[in-house]
Image (spheres, helix red, strand yellow):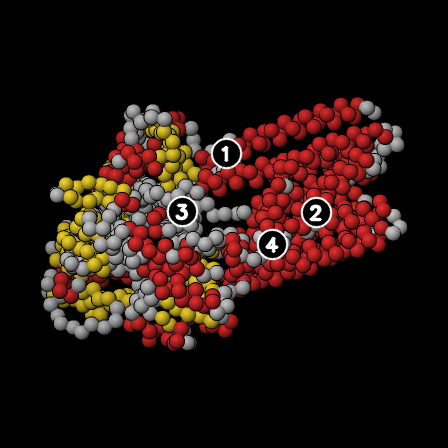
Amino acid sequence: MERTEHNQNSEILEQQSGTRIFCYHCGDECPDDSIHINEKIFCCNGCKTVYEILHQHDLCNYYDIDNSPGITKKYDVKRNLDFLDDPDLKQKLIDFSDGKTSKVTLTIPQMHCSSCIWILENLYKLNDGIISSQVNFLQKKLFINYSEERTNLRQIVELLDSIGYEPLLNLEEKKEEKAKAENRNLYYKIGIAGFCFGNIMLLSFPEYLSIGTEELPEMKRIFAYINILLSLPVFFYSSTEYFSSAWKGLKKKIVNIDVPIALGILVLFLRSVIDILFLNGAGYLDSLSGLVFFLLIGKLFQNKTYETLNFERNYKSYFPISVTIRKENVETTIPVEKLEVGKRIIVRNNEIIPADSILIKGKANIDYSFVTGESKPITKFTGEMIYAGGRQVGEAIELETIKEVSQSYLTQLWNSKTFHKEEESKIVSLANSISKHFTFIVLLIAIAGTVYWLFSDVTLAFNAFTAVLIVACPCALALSTPFTLGNTLRIFGRNKFYLKNTNVIEQLASVDHIVFDKTGTITENNSAEVKFVGQLSQYEKSLIKSSVRNSSHPLSRSIYNFFDNTDLIPIELFNEISGEGIEAIINGHKIKIGSRYFASTSQMANDNGTRVYISIDNNDTGYFIISNKYRDGLKEIISRLEKEYELSLLSGDNDSEREKLRDFFADDKELHFKQSPHEKLDYINNLQKNGKKVLMIGDGLNDAGALKQSDVGISISDNINNFSPACDGILDANSFNKLADFIHFSRKSKKVIIASFVLSFIYNIIGLAFAVSGSLSPIVAAILMPISSISVVVFTTFSVNFIARKERFI
Amino acid sequence: MSVVFVLIGASLLVAVGFLAAYLWAVKSGQFDDKHTPSIRILFENNKKSQNEESKKPNTGNTQPNEKK
């Protein structure tokens, strides 16, 4: 009887759903057209409200620039923004204020399309206190100028929250300003060097081609003087960083690549000035300015950074700025760094627990996905200890702190010395290690040449000495690294592997031990392996899918995604009980989905994986088994890497999955379970003490120490704009299966660099032949220098692209 | 032939003008964000397009569209 009713219902359903409906605001699928304004249909009331706000203010252009550009409000939770009224905290968030107008920079991760830019730059129409707002799309930043008299920071943040663009609020150190100034400096230097280079070249032409030198002998002189003038800014401004870098290196007794460059630049300049002023010569100023110009271009190419991504984050950028404390039944908000041991704190839905504490009141349901990578919340009861870093899901809870914020189980990781040592010390690039020998040999040749000529001709000896240093200036050598690695960095970026800088590629090429984290790294975060035990009709599937649609619990999301071709039915009643499950009434059927106690009457034995029980109209229908799903291609990657590298696995979980993991990892001894964040760090440290170069692949905050300690730390992320701990590179989870190829590619890039070194040495030998014989004329230098540089750049670019094509990266 | 010096002077002056323009452009932040302006330029003049929008009858748009 009941079956036939189901069938009828599903037939009706199929008729209705001939056309699928999508939300006008966010583009998500709608179950029906019940929420609508005129012909515009919305998936939820949140989306409808945003539309209404925008419509009211004549901002519907938003929907014309891109279709359905909105951010869904389905899982929206209102944030507690009380702390924005606190003057101290406000001061820290604001860039500048003169009492009347203030400037603030907000980070908005939700920005994704042109409509977003448009609406965010038209904020003044929604709040007349906002004077102007400007977006930097790649950095996902919004710069707001507002009047303190007509509005305040809290109102602005509330406005942004209400239309779905929730700004990230944390007190991350404002390092970016410095990086910006450095970047601008490079542009100034390139501009000036380019300007001088062009003009000096132009003024040197008569000399090259011997035009007019006979009719107008003073022309050559005057042109040469102008050249000296033009070369002054190149020498004293554009090239300064090579001198300072060389000096820094020498002070540490390191001969880096900048030493021969600085030497070359210095000699070029002095020799040219002496030539022009005293010897009636032409000098090599064209070579000098060209050299500096090309070197700076190389630097710009190497400096490619992913502005959107932040590789320096620590726990502070994700912990709250403020916390609500309760004292004698009065709730106050204090900055989180002032939180002491023994305070009663209130943590509301979706807020993060700032310090290790004991649960006093309420039911805790803690989501540790940022910390461990595990997305299923853990239920805790009164009296139990809760570690900092988890996110409460559900009702507000009351806790008593037992540790300070910086001394908690997780956060004390940042007190270890790994986080306080200087970054540069561990990087010895190929170019720098070669330059030591290179500089030595060049000086030897220069001195030998001088001594040889000294007996016959003193002027020639001086010429030969300076010429050797000029020719040996490793322009081509210095360019081959930035162009090869810069190009590799871009190719990686196109394949969704984002590196902090080009040094990482060289490091990656020399790695010999690879360490994996388990949860969230080699297992998938948002898609679990779902298996249903029992029988379901098409109609029952629709019932279940419709019920879980409104829940943001990760298990609900997994079940929702499990039913692919299933239609949605409007829900009559929906209730989510945190830690237990969900209840829904659809077409008069009562559906319960959740834990065994909640949804089932049966007694069944437990095995691996999480179970979700289903009951429809109080009948047990069956249960889902949801277990970790290993990433696609894991088996292949491991077996490929196993041939060349030592592999190990560090997991914070217990060893219940050891058997499964044996399928992937051949060496059982290298599987380590129940590792604390500190133990992970120490493990890496021990490997390094045994002379290993370690690549760590992790994701959550508990891997932060290991990622930092390792020679290369790569963090895996499903959404690269989301939080990821400090690391050297971020790998998009979709590109995980290319991991072995990336490592392989970095090694090939290193080979390209070596090949281009050989090429540039050949040029140097040719130049040296001219130089030691004392016959290096300005024109030979002016031809040899650019040709060697350009051919090296062309060679590296082509060979890297060729390899990338062969490896199917482009 | 000495006119060449005048010409060189003039050409350098022009070139310095361009250099100054470039330095000003860097200073005013035009090289800080090279992406957003390329999108911003495609927006129609706000006031005009909004008037048109409010005149238009409601055009229900229920097509599925992938977010970028």
Disc number for residue A253: 4
Circle 4 or circle 3, nearest the eye: 4
Q: Please state the horizontal and vertical placement of residue A277, each as a whole percent of the image.
A: 79, 34
Q: Is residue A748 left or right of residue A106?
A: right
Q: Please state the horizontal and vertical placement of residue A320, each as a whole percent of the image.
A: 29, 46
SS label for mark 3: loop
Q: Amino acid at mark 4?
A: Lys
Circle 2 or circle 4, nearest the eye: 4
Q: CA distance from mark 2 to mark 3?
A: 50 Å
Chain name for mark 4 = A
Q: Are marks 1 and 2 on the same chain?
A: no
The 10 Å Cα crowd at callout 1, few under 14, some 14 to 19, many 20 or more, is few
The 10 Å Cα crowd at callout 4, few under 14, some 14 to 19, many 20 or more, is few
Circle 2 or circle 3, nearest the eye: 2
Chain name for mark 2 = A
Chain name for mark 1 = B
In primary-sequence order, the first of circles 1 and 3 is 1
Do the CB atoms of the residues marked 4 and 3 lie less than 8 Å apart?
Answer: no
Q: CA distance from mark 2 to mark 4?
A: 19 Å
Circle 1 or circle 3, nearest the eye: 1
Q: Residue at x 76, y 34 (%)?
A: A203
Q: Residue at x 41, y 54 (%)?
A: A419
Q: CA distance from mark 1 to mark 3?
A: 27 Å
Q: Amino acid at mark 2?
A: Gly
Q: Is residue A255 left or right of residue A79?
A: right
Which residue in the structure is indicated by mark 2?
A: A264
In primary-sequence order, the first of circles 2 and 4 is 4
Q: Quadrant of residue A807?
A: bottom right
